């Protein structure tokens, strides 16, 4: 009985603590937990499958790893455009639901999916048509074997853009509604297929890059079909008919683009800057490309909970703003920021002791192991101190409709600071890959300060998003 009393006391304390720091008039902490837990599994699956796939392609040699890393910098640039437009849909859907205006939610869902399909189709056609020119322009200094693999992977990736766009738009819809279990099913399905097919085609049949391309296209195609099935089979007021999924509802399309376009533009400039820094690294040689690729994959492990909170805060703040609950919106931003930093610290405690073992899974050249470990340790400290202000805060600002401000700040900080400083530190001063990463971390600090000051004011939540 005494033990039961202690348990009840601890449970009561936890309930009061969580209510104080997370609950409000729009959502309570239990609803947030129901939102966060599936997203956490979702993000874990994405990161671990990416890590697993990178280790598998590394068995085909550093040329293959370098090719995948180069093309993925282009893929990140382009796919984030789709994600940005889909995020605009998330904000609209979350605010409509928060405001209680449920009849507009299906229209917002249709507008989100339609806008992403239009953009992804146009980009896919352009990339396939101009893939040789794109690679020669960006990475012409790379070794010929790396470029040959890169061409195959880029065209194959482009073939899957529309399928990825459909899945991402539907997943963003579910996040806006708070139905993150459905988005989790889509993610698990797609990445399970991708990992399984990669293992069969790369490890068993030794198809290398071609095997990875087949796996990518097939897994995204099946995930997109499942996404459409989820929309037409939902048993609530948000269910859509098949004919309504792609619909040219111009007022809703305009609203989705008005929120998504600034973020998409930001992503184009932001990831364009990352591609430019990638060209600095390409000029340093294949080992430098491999160092950067492996380090990026390893350090993503630390960010699984952080990325989860960054996605969750969009839904929470969006619904709070839709309900005109500014007090809880501010509380959520503060609490999620602290939670993000603590999560990075916790992940570091679990991962860092085994970091060398994880790095060895990539079969790196002996001479780059020390650099990978050093960059990873420095980057973890920077993530703990700087990442929440630099990335979670702008996600919250976008959820309130403050997309233009966040986009301008992100573009300016990237091009005026990370790119210039990255070139100076990495190339002119000769610090190599380490210099490029230090520049990135310094840029996090600069933009984080700006976003922190913005959140302290009141202009960020006064935008009109809904009709």
Image: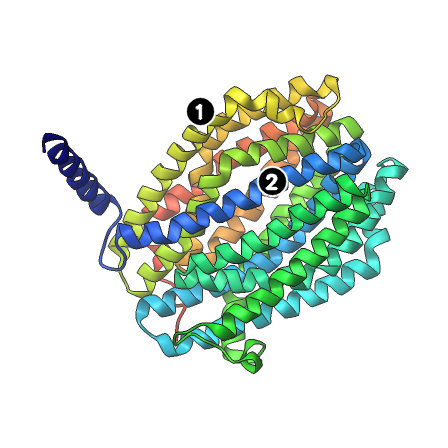
Q: Considering only vertical position in the picture, is 459 above or below 70? A: below
Q: Earlier in the sequence, mark 2 or mark 1?
A: 1
Q: Considering only vertical position in the picture, is 296 above or below 213? A: above
Residue 412 picture location, percent across and down: 57, 45
User: Along the line of sight, which residue is nearer the eye, 331 or 102?
Assistant: 102
Q: Is residue 137 visible?
A: no
Residue linked to disc 2? 416
Crowd around label 2: few <14 · some 14–19 · many ≥20 (10 Å): few
In the picture provided, is 399 more to the left or to the right than 423? left
Instruction: Determine the residue positioned at 61% across, 57% down.
Output: 81
Asked whether disc 2 touches disc 1, contact meaning CB atoms under 8 Å apart, the reply is: no
Q: Quadrant of residue 416?
A: top right
Instruction: Determine the residue positioned at 67% across, 64% down.
Output: 162
Which mark, by number, is residue 349?
Answer: 1
Residue 191 picture location, percent across and down: 61, 50
Q: Secondary structure at mark 2?
A: helix
Q: Secondary structure at mark 1?
A: helix
Q: Quadrant of residue 12?
A: top left
Instruction: Determine the residue positioned at 81% across, 34% down.
Output: 63
In the picture provided, is 341 more to the left or to the right than 119? left
Residue 393 picture location, percent across and down: 42, 46
Q: Which quadrant would the C terminus be assigned to in this image?
A: bottom left
């Amino acid at each position: 009985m005494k033990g039961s009393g202690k348990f009840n006391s601890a449970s009561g304390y936890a309930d009061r603590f969580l209510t104080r720091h997370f609950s409000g008039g729009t959502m309570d902490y239990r609803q947030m937990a129901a939102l966060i837990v599936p997203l956490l599994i979702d993000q874990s699956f994405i990161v671990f499958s990416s890590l697993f796939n990178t280790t598998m392609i590394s068995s085909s040699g550093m040329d293959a790893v370098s090719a995948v890393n180069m093309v993925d910098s282009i893929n990140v640039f382009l796919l984030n455009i789709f994600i940005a437009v889909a995020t605009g849909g998330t904000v609209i859907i979350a605010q409509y639901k928060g405001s209680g205006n449920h009849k507009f939610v299906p229209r917002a869902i249709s507008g989100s999916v339609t806008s992403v399909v239009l953009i992804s189709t146009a980009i896919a056609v352009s990339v396939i048509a101009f893939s040789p020119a794109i690679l020669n322009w960006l990475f012409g200094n790379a070794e010929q074997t790396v470029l040959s693999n890169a061409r195959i992977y880029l065209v194959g990736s482009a073939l899957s853009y529309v399928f990825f766009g459909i899945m991402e738009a539907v997943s963003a819809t579910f996040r806006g509604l708070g139905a993150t279990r459905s988005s989790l099913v889509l993610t698990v399905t797609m990445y399970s297929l991708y990992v399984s097919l990669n293992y069969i085609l790369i490890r068993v049949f030794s198809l290398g890059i071609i095997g990875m391309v087949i796996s990518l296209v097939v897994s995204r195609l099946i995930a997109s079909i499942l996404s459409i099935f989820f929309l037409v089979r939902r048993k609530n007021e948000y269910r859509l008919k098949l004919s309504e999924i792609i619909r040219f509802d111009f007022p809703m399309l305009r609203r989705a683009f008005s929120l998504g376009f600034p973020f998409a533009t930001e992503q184009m400039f932001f990831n364009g800057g990352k591609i430019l820094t990638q060209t600095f690294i390409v000029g340093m040689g294949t080992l430098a490309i491999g160092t950067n690729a492996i380090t990026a994959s390893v350090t993503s492990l630390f960010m699984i909970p952080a990325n989860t909170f960054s996605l969750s805060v969009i839904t929470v703040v969006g619904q709070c703003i839709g309900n005109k609950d500014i007090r809880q919106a501010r509380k959520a931003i503060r609490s999620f920021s602290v939670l993000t930093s603590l999560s990075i610290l916790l992940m570091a405690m679990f991962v860092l002791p085994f970091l060398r073992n994880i790095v060895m899974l990539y079969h790196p050249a002996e001479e780059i192991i020390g650099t990978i470990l050093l960059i990873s340790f420095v980057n973890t400290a920077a993530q703990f101190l700087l990442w929440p202000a630099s990335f979670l805060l702008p996600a919250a600002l976008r959820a309130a409709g403050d997309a233009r401000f966040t986009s301008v700040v992100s573009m300016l900080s990237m091009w005026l600071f990370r790119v210039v400083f990255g070139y100076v530190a990495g190339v002119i001063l000769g610090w190599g890959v380490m210099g490029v990463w230090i520049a990135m971390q310094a840029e996090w600090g600069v933009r984080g300060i700006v976003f922190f000051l913005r959140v302290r004011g009141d202009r960020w939540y006064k935008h009109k998003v809904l009709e």
